[in-house]
Amino acid sequence: MKPKLLIIELWGLGDLAIATPFLRAASDQYTVTLLAKPYAQDLQARLWPGVEVLPFVAPWTAFQGKYHLWRWPWLELLRLRRLVAERRFDAGLSARWDPRDHVLLRGAGIRRRYGFPRLQSQVLLTDPLVKPVPRDHRYEYWRVLAQALDLTLPPRDVIPMPLSRPNGTVFLHSGAGQPVRVWPLGRYRLIVQWLREKKYRVVVACDPDQRDWWLRAGETGVFTPRTVNDLVSLIDEAGVFIGNDSGPGHLAAFCGVPTFSFFGPQLPEWFAPLHPDSLCLEGKPCPYKPCSDYCRFSLPRCLSEMSEAEAWFHLEPFVAQHLGPRPTVPRQLTTV
């Protein structure tokens, strides 16, 4: 019988996608349970069929009010602790240097507890690990954990990916987890227009709060995926993905689709999608970067100062590389 392993990854869709190689490798040697947000259940069959998902929304993952302890669902947290303890896991881990994860591992009585200490949380871990160097990609934390568990993960540039089915379709998703990660929508609209002039088929999707903007801009066929499964069904028809530093881009990468991502507050070397053909266009310099989505300015200058002409200079050859070139169409570039 395989030993039982609990993996904690309570944050975003992109974080779950980055964890995919570890989850797959761990499920070969362990009976794996993943504690994650409920939408991980939609990813399970597609990305980690050998993993059980235990859904939970942690109050400390909220963007605002995460430290209002009096509003935390304490009864739900106690039930979770009891449920995890009843499973009698042989080992548990978190790839984040988050003492709250470590408290949960220790409070549930898990025998071996692996993690990256912070604020003296090594006292809660049986196996505290040394973090990768500061500029390393988020994926490297999973590689350190894999080494501690005698698992092998490939370097990020040779992770096996499924082959996409390029059919000439460009899938553009203009949403992101936070507004400061969104390249201006007016510039996305011009990119869509220019791609269509070059005879590419473009499918546009967005977050719910952007839908009315796209409809007013004349994009009557805009999609607003409500579930991860809805999003995956659109990705499966794409030859390339265009979007922000966001979960949909990371998911597209693990569905085998080359990705083009606009990066603003965060650094591509930390969070670039793991597809070998991913391309990231980094925003303008800022003395506060990376700012973890808490921008000091009314508009995120890192993205607002990146013009559509600059983006097109990099984007046009990217699309042509993966979907084939189209006839050149002379144009007048206009800044929005």
Image (cartoon, rainbow, N blue to C red):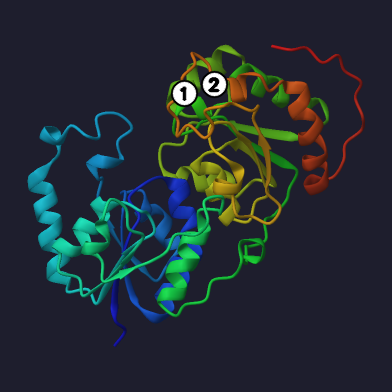
Residue 53, given in percent of the width and then of the height, sits at 31, 60
| Residue 38, visible in the rendered structure | yes
* Residue 115: assigned label: none
At label 2, the amino acid type is Pro
Q: Residue at (49%, 22%) from the top-left corner?
A: 211
Q: Residue at (63%, 63%) from the top-left corner?
A: 162
How far is mark 2 from mark 1, CA to CA? 6 Å
Q: Quadrant of residue 12?
A: top left
Q: Residue at (58%, 31%) from the top-left corner?
A: 264
- Crowding near the residue tagged with mark 1, few <14, some 14–19, many ≥20 C-alpha atoms within 10 Å: some
Q: Disc 1 designates what residue?
A: 295
At label 1, the amino acid type is Cys
Q: Compared with residue 265, is residue 32 higher up or lower down, i.e. above or below?
A: below
Q: Quadrant of residue 300?
A: top right
- Spot the residue most to the bottom: 1
Is 176 positioned to the left or the right of 122 in the image? right
Q: Quadrant of residue 153?
A: bottom right
Quadrant the N terminus occupies:
bottom left
Q: Compared with residue 119, is residue 70 higher up or lower down, i.e. above or below?
A: above
Q: Disc 2 designates what residue?
A: 300
Is 270 positioned to the left or the right of 99 in the image? right
Q: Are marks 2 and 1 in contact (CB under 8 Å)?
A: yes
Residue 192, given in percent of the width and then of the height, sits at 70, 26
| Residue 219, visible in the rendered structure | no
What SS does tag 2 mark?
A: loop
Q: Residue at (52%, 60%) from the top-left corner?
A: 140
Earlier in the chain: of badge 2 and badge 1, it is 1
Is 110 positioned to the left or the right of 31 in the image? left
Residue 105, given in percent of the width and then of the height, sits at 22, 63
